[in-house]
Amino acid sequence: MREDIQDIYPLSPIQQGILFHGLHNPEMALYHMHNVYVCQGNLNIAAFKQALQLLSDVHSVLRTSFYWEELDNPLQVVHEQVEVLLEYDDWRKIASSEQEKKLRLLLKEDRSRGFDFSQVPLIRPILIQTGDDTYYFVFVWHLIIIDGWSFPILLADLVRIYEALSQNQNVPQLPKSHFGEYIDWLQQKNTSKSQAEDFWREQLKGVKQPTPLHNLYSQNLANQEERYEDLQISLSTTTTQNLEMLAKQSRTTMSTFVQGAWGILTSYYSGKNKILYGCTFSGRPVDLKNSGLMIGEMVNTLPVNLEVDLNDELLPWLQKLQMKLVEIREYEYFPLLDIQKCSELPSNQSLFDSFVVFENQRDDKLLQEYSSLDIYPYISSYKTNYPFTIVGYPSSELTIGINYDFNLIDALTVTNILEHFKILLEGMVSKPQTTINELLLLINQKTHPDLLLLEKEMSLNFQS
């Protein structure tokens, strides 16, 4: 074993899937993540560089590379030490009106640059000075090592280390995160699969095809602009507060309301009353110590099989959905590939065309909590291998984002879907004692005629 290798272990199932997409479709830059922040204040660049280096000492995933050639099963290798380089550029002589264009070009070029999974680290921090006390901080990372749950925690750790260094204080003793502990836990779980297989076989009983969303796809998109950012829509502060209160009163969650809205819309768009969509679960097991603070790729996207009856009353239907999600969480560790085998679908066909993610926390709150600098999110961009990725962003104003395949779907369609989302969530708040049918009628009443999506095809006479 080489002297610089600390550990070697297998990939988690979701890491295997991400590696597959990265190796077979590198030109699509799937799961290649960009988070851009604007920093204002007296930034100590030397301390910032040192903080990035110390961050890799704390978290093993920042020292992890992947090997797959001539191996039946790929492996991830944790190195003892990795040099993290901070790329720095000075744009102060560039007009502010041009800086935005230059940033967009930088992100595009970085996507083309891609990642070599056999090289560490699989992050690229970039600091761009745009004024005497203003900066773009571009954090480039790959989802194969860090998931959406981990990222805000990682960023908060970076800021806490930087603050100590910039003020000549002792660096805080942050808990070291070793992703191998999760892999060990996962392998123990997989020694007995029969109970999970029985559960998923029951969940997917009768599912013979994915829920069709093809009528949302567009033709002749050759000239459509590439888009790696979400399109978003936000609820008002009052509506968000009332929705949060309603979720508590009904013993559900905001995430359940967002998923319920997407389930209803999926049924509406497909004309089916039995629908299947994906839901991303945190994958943080309660029986693994400190799993909630662990940095790594632990999330799992799992199928949710749902029946949407027009005559169902909204709140009892959402409570039923909540119970289903709680049941699924017990088996959230089970690989999606193995779940697919529990269904009647062919192995080469995806179970779903869309999935829902509800973020656990906003990174801007964590940044302000630990930083003396004024740091706020500016751009976030990525692409998954699914046509629709629905993201709920919790804040004082609940935001719904949709990341979509710009080769299949046009921006106007997504804008309309977001408007439908807002109509449904506002309807849930204003009249919770309603039926699903009454909620859907609001779409026809409130959507602008120029934006209506194929209403003739989207008949409310659902088919089974």
Image: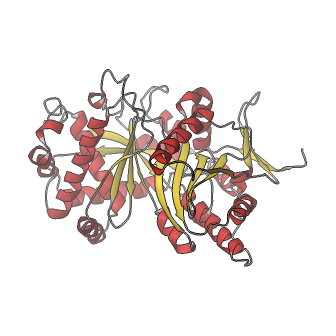
State left or right for residue 258 relative to residue 378.
Answer: left
Between residues 183 and 92, which one lies in front from this camera angle? 92
Instruction: Residue 122: name its quadrant.
Output: top right
The residue at 49%/39% (across/down) is: 339
* Image mark count: 0
Can residue 50 be seen at all in this image of the molecule?
yes
Rendered view: 394 above or below 209: below
Q: How is the image coloured?
A: secondary structure
Image location (x, y in percent) of residue 314:
20, 57
The C terminus: image quadrant:
top left
Residue 76: image x %, image y %?
73, 43
Q: Nearer the viewer, residue 314 or 46?
A: 46
Residue occupying the point 71% across, 59% down:
49
Instruction: Name the residue rendered at 12%, 48% in the picture.
Output: 446
From where the camera sits, is residue 322 visible? Answer: no
The x and y percentages for residue 204 are 39, 39
Nearest the viewer among 170 and 265 is: 170
Q: Where's residue 333, x and y in %?
A: 55, 50
The part of the image, by quadrant, that contains residue 283 is: bottom right
Relative height, residue 349 to residue 170 (above, below): above
Left or right relative to 28: residue 435: left
Q: What residue sits 56% from the left and 51% below the top?
A: 147
Quadrant in which the N terminus is drawn: top right
Residue 254, quarter of the rendered image: bottom left
Q: Is residue 377 left or right of residue 93?
A: left
